[in-house]
Image (cartoon, helix red, strand yellow):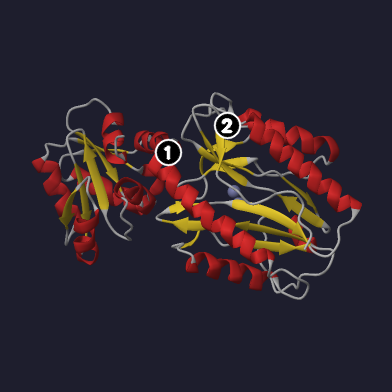
């Protein structure tokens, strides 16, 4: 299996003297496996260089296998020297990840070395194409991150009862994840209960859990740079018929989308499978897409959305997360993460999703 750097080399335009300059932290880490707050990766058809400053140089030399590691004092000078040594005449910039000021700076660095800077989105498209399909090693990292998330869910079920606050539950989940090997949380964990549950991206508050509440937890661990993402809604004390019906509708929608997701399926059709079920009985209550890719970023391509005509390919990792949100009353969301395989999908999420009443 080729490394990410080798796959990027393959995708570079067939053009003498061309190079890709990767400047975003996410994509630097994606290519090298090395996290740092400063640095650049230059990739040509013939070679790859990771440049960083004194703070990261020693660690980078130890960790990075696929690139020559260089230390700079002035990044622009080191870059220009490399342009000359490697006879580089055209540099593709990671334009969508640069601020206007950064893009101007890089363009000036290129210009004064007689190199043309390309900021037409070519490199951004190449990186998206690369990252949308994961290697088996990447999927293993996501699987491991999800295993921690599954364990945290099992653990937290014993801690949810009337009187604890949403914030306490969120903190407890985060501590559990970090204690069990996570590098951090994949995103600010969401714990919302009762009427707060209708805010799909609500922030955990001081609200105490009450009997009769639905508690929605959207949680994920970060491991070795890879994210996991799962949502479960559980009930506390008792549930009404109404709550039960909403929960079952979301579950039916989620199962329908999971069944629709397979290699060759179009992303929008997976979204439709879930959306049709919810729209029938609860029109207008499901206001977000059915899922998103997960990898070195928590939200990446593809999307299970009406607007995404991407065809599912083996190696893609995507969430399936329909929900129903009844303003001022309650909300339900159920989210799994799947990896598309040659013959179907592997559900990376193992937490139960039949209605749990605590
Ligand atoms: Zn989520
Ligand atoms: Zn998600």
Q: Residue at x 45, y 63 (%)?
A: 181
**Quadrant showing the C terminus:** bottom right
Q: Give the CA distance from mark 2 to mark 1.
A: 19 Å
Residue at the left extreme, as displayed: 85
Res 220 seen here = no
The answer to whether 90 is drawn above or below residue 72 in the figure is: above
Q: Is residue 18 left or right of residue 292?
A: left
User: Looking at this view, is 1 or 20 the one in front?
Assistant: 1
Residue 140, x across and y down, in percent:
44, 46
User: Looking at this view, is 330 or 249 the one in front?
Assistant: 249
Residue 326, x across and y down, in percent:
81, 52
Q: Any mark on residue 134, and which?
A: 1
Q: Residue at x 27, y 43 (%)?
A: 21
Q: Quadrant of residue 154?
A: bottom right
Q: Any mark on residue 308, and which?
A: 2
User: Looking at this view, is 249 or 123 the one in front?
Assistant: 249
Q: Is mark 2 within 8 Å of ligand 2?
A: no
Residue 245, x across and y down, in percent:
85, 46
Mark positioned earlier in the residue sequence (2 or 1): 1
Residue 19, x across and y down, in percent:
23, 37
């Amino acid at each position: 299996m080729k490394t990410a750097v080798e796959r990027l080399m393959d995708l570079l335009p067939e053009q003498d003297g061309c190079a890709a300059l990767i400047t975003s932290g996410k994509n630097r880490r994606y290519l090298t496996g090395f996290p740092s707050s400063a640095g650049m990766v230059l990739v040509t058809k013939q070679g790859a260089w990771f440049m960083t400053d004194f703070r990261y140089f020693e660690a980078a030399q130890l960790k990075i296998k696929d690139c020559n590691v260089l230390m700079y004092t002035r990044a622009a000078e080191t870059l220009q020297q490399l342009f000359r040594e490697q006879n580089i005449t055209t540099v593709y910039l990671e334009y969508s990840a640069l601020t206007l000021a950064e893009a101007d700076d890089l363009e000036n660095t290129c210009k004064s070395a007689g190199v043309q800077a390309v900021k037409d989105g070519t490199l951004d498209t190449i990186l998206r194409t690369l990252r949308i399909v994961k290697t088996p090693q990447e999927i293993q990292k996501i699987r491991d991150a999800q295993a921690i998330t599954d364990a945290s869910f099992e653990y937290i079920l014993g801690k949810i009862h009337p009187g604890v606050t949403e914030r306490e539950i969120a903190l407890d989940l985060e501590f559990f994840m970090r204690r069990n090997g996570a590098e951090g949380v994949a995103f600010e964990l969401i714990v919302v209960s009762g009427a707060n549950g209708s805010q799909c991206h609500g922030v955990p508050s001081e609200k105490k859990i009450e009997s009769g509440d639905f508690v929605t937890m959207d949680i994920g661990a970060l491991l070795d740079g890879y994210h996991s993402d799962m949502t479960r809604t559980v009930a506390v004390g008792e549930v009404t018929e109404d709550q039960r019906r909403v929960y079952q509708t979301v579950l039916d929608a989620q199962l329908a989308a999971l069944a629709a997701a397979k290699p060759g399926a179009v992303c929008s059709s997976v979204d439709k499978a879930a959306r049709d079920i919810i729209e029938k009985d609860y029109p207008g209550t499901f206001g977000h897409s059915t899922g998103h890719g997960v990898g070195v970023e928590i939200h990446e391509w593809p999307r299970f959305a009406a607007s995404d005509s991407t065809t599912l390919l083996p190696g893609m990792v995507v969430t399936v997360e329909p929900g129903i949100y009844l303003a001022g009353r309650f909300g339900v969301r159920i989210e799994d993460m799947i990896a598309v395989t040659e013959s179907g999908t592997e559900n990376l999420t193992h937490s139960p999703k039949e209605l749990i009443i605590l």
